[in-house]
Amino acid sequence: MRDLACGSGRGAHGRRQFRARNAAERFARTVGAAGSARCRFLLRHQQANGTFFTRYEPLQDQLYEGIDLPRLAHAAWVLTRVSSGHDMPAGEAAARAATFLLNTAEEAADGLWLVHAGNDRSVAENALLVLALCETSMGALRGREVPRLAAALWSRIDAHGRVHTHADEALMGALASDAYQDYFPGQVLLALAAAVRAGLTPMDEAKLARAFRYYRHRFRNRPHFGQVSWLAQACHAWWRVKPDPCFADLAFEVADWVLQFQQKKSGAFLNDHQSDTPGYTTALYLEGLGAAACLARSAGNAQRHRDYLESCRRGFQFLDGLIIQSRDASLLPNPAMAIGGLRRSSRSSEVCVDFVQHYLAALIEVREATEAG
C-alpha cells in the first residue's frame, strides 16, 4: 500500500513525485481562483456604454477615461473566453463591449474598419473583434460580421506576406508603420485561424504561407518581446486548424527565446518592453508560453510542456506581488475599486485595464495547457 501511495511511503523518488503532483494541483487551483478575481476587477471598471476606464490610480482613487479600440476589443475577447465557463456577468460585459465596437464599424473601399475619434484605423481592433465574435454564442452576429471582418484582414496581406497594419499607412511613414509589425500581424494571423476554425472564412493557403514565412524570418532576424505573445498564440491557433510541424517549431523558437530573459530567483522577465522592468509585461510572455505549452502537449513534446508550465508557474508567482489584494486594503482609499488590479511594476501603483486583461488572458492559456496535462 505504501508503494501505491507514491510518496506517502518511503523513498526520495516517491516523495518528489508526491510533491510535484501537489504543486501542479495547487497551481491549477490558483489559476482558477485568480482568474475569477481579475475578471471581477474588469467588470467593476466597465461603463454603461460597454467601454472601460482605461487607467486607475489606486492610491489617489483616480479613474481615467478614454476610448482605445484595440484594448476594448481585447477586453471583449478575454471576457468572452471567460464566459465560456458559464460566467454570465462576463458574457454580458463582453456583449456590451462588442456592441459598442460594432456600432463604430464603417464600410470602406478596402474593407470594414472600426472608426472612432482619436484612433487610427488599424487591423488590431478588427482582428481582436473577430476573436471575440468567434468565441461568442450569438450565431447570427458571428455569421454576419466575422466573414466581412476576416475578408478585410486577408486583404491586408501583400504579395510578400507583410501585413499592412493601418488604413492610412502611407500617411504614417515607414518608421511609424514598422513599429507595429511586432504586434498587429500576429493578431491578424491569430484571428484568421480562429475564423477558419469556426468555418466563418475560407483559408487562403497562399497568403497564409507567405505571411508565415515573412514573420518567421522577421523573428529569426529581429526578435522582439512584442512578438512573443501574439506569434506563439497564432502558431498554436493554426496548429489546431492544421497540425503542421512548422507551426510548432516557430512557437517553440519564440518560447525558448523569451525564456532566456526570465529571472531564476523571481520568475519575472527582464526586457526592454517597459521602462521600469520587470513588471506587468511578464503577463504578456506568459500568454505566449501558455500557448506554446498547450501546443507542446498536442505535439507530444512532454518535456517542453513541463518546462513551459514551470516557467509560467514562476511567472505568476512574480505577478502575485504586483496584484492588489485584500492584504493591501489598509493602504487604499477605495479597496473595492482597486482589489484585483495588476500594478505596472513594484515601483508604480498605476493600473491600466489592459494589464489586467493580459493577466487574465495568460491565466486562460495556462489553464488550458494545465488541463491538457
Image (spheres, rainbow, N blue to C red):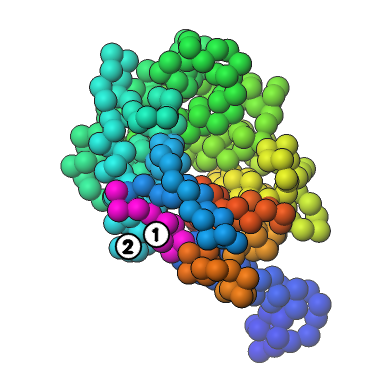
What's drawn in magenta, residue-wise? Answer: 39-49
Q: Residue at x 81, y 58 (%)?
A: 265
Residue corresponding to mark 1: 43
The tag earlier along the polypeptide, 2 or 1, is 1
Q: Residue at left 48%, top 10%?
A: 170
Where residue 45 appears, as percent x and y from the top left, is 42, 56
Q: Can residue 240 be seen in this view?
A: no
Residue 89, disc: 2
Q: Which residue is drawn at 64% across and 63% down?
A: 320
Q: Does the magenta stretch include residue 48?
A: yes
State which quarter of the image contains the C terminus.
Answer: bottom right
Residue 302 coordinates in the image, percent (x, y):
64, 53
How far across and how far down the image is residue 245, in percent?
56, 34
Circle 2: residue type: Pro
Is the C-beta separation of discs 2 and 1 under 8 Å? Answer: yes
Q: Residue 298's spot in the image, x, y percent?
A: 53, 48
Q: Which of 138 and 340 is in front in this view?
A: 340
Query: What secondary structure is found at the residue carrying circle 1?
Result: helix
Residue 293 magenta-drawn?
no
Q: Which of 323 and 251 is in front in this view?
A: 323
Q: Nearer the viewer, residue 332 or 253?
A: 332
**Rounded to the nearest whole Å, what is the CA distance between mark 2 and mark 1?**
8 Å
In the depicted structure, whether residue 357 falls above or below residue 58: above
| Numbered label attached to residue 137 | none
